[in-house]
Amino acid sequence: MKGKGQNIINKIIALLLTMQIFLIGLQAKVRIDQGNSSLEALIWMTQQYISVLIKVGSLQEKKEKGDSGKGKGKT
């Protein structure tokens, strides 16, 4: 039961991170429309994506630690 709940939470987190990436792209378009150059918008987007990738990486590390902990308990 706990695994199923964790799976739902993981899917929600993935959805929220996807929405964050979409909104970053939308904000970059707004920046270009407001007069920023495409290069400035690209640099800004890259900086924003780095924070998302760090979040994903930390979630992946937590998942791997949780999976390795489960494996040890069964042996």
Image (spheres, rainbow, N blue to C red):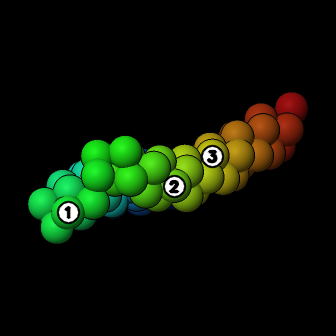
Can I make out residue 54 in this image?
yes
Q: Quadrant of residue 73?
A: top right
Category of crowding for the residue at label 3, using alpha-carbon neighbours closer than 10 angstroms: few (below 14), some (14–19), many (at least 20): few
Q: Nearer the viewer, mark 1 or mark 3?
A: 1
What residue type is disc 3 on? Gly
The residue beneath circle 1 is 35
Marks 1/2: CA–CA distance: 19 Å
One can see residue 26 in this view: no
All told, the count of numbered labels is: 3
Residue beneath the point at 61% across and 52% down = 54
Q: Nearer the viewer, mark 1 or mark 2?
A: 1
Contact flag, marks 1 and 3 (Cβ < 8 Å) = no
Question: Residue at coordinates 86% horizontally, 32% vertically from top-left?
Answer: 75
Secondary element type, mark 2: helix
Dot 3 falls on a residue whose secondary structure is: helix
Amino acid on which disc 1 is placed: Gly
Residue beneath label 2, please? 47
**Residue 51: x %, y % from top left:** 55, 58
Which residue lies at the image location 20% right of the left edge and 63% below the top edge? 35
In this rendering, position of residue 61 left or right of residue 36 = right
**Amino acid residing under circle 2:** Gln
First in sequence: mark 2 or mark 3? 2
Residue underneath mark 3: 57
Tag nearer the camera, 2 or 3 = 2
- How far apart in space, not on screen, are marks 1 and 3 (Cα)? 33 Å
How far from the left and from the top, in percent, is residue 9?
41, 59
Q: Position of residue 58 (x, y in %)?
A: 66, 53
33 and 15: which is toward the camera: 33
Q: Describe the element under mark 1 as helix, strand or loop.
A: loop
In the rendered structure, which disc, 1 or 3, sits on the residue that comes first in sequence? 1
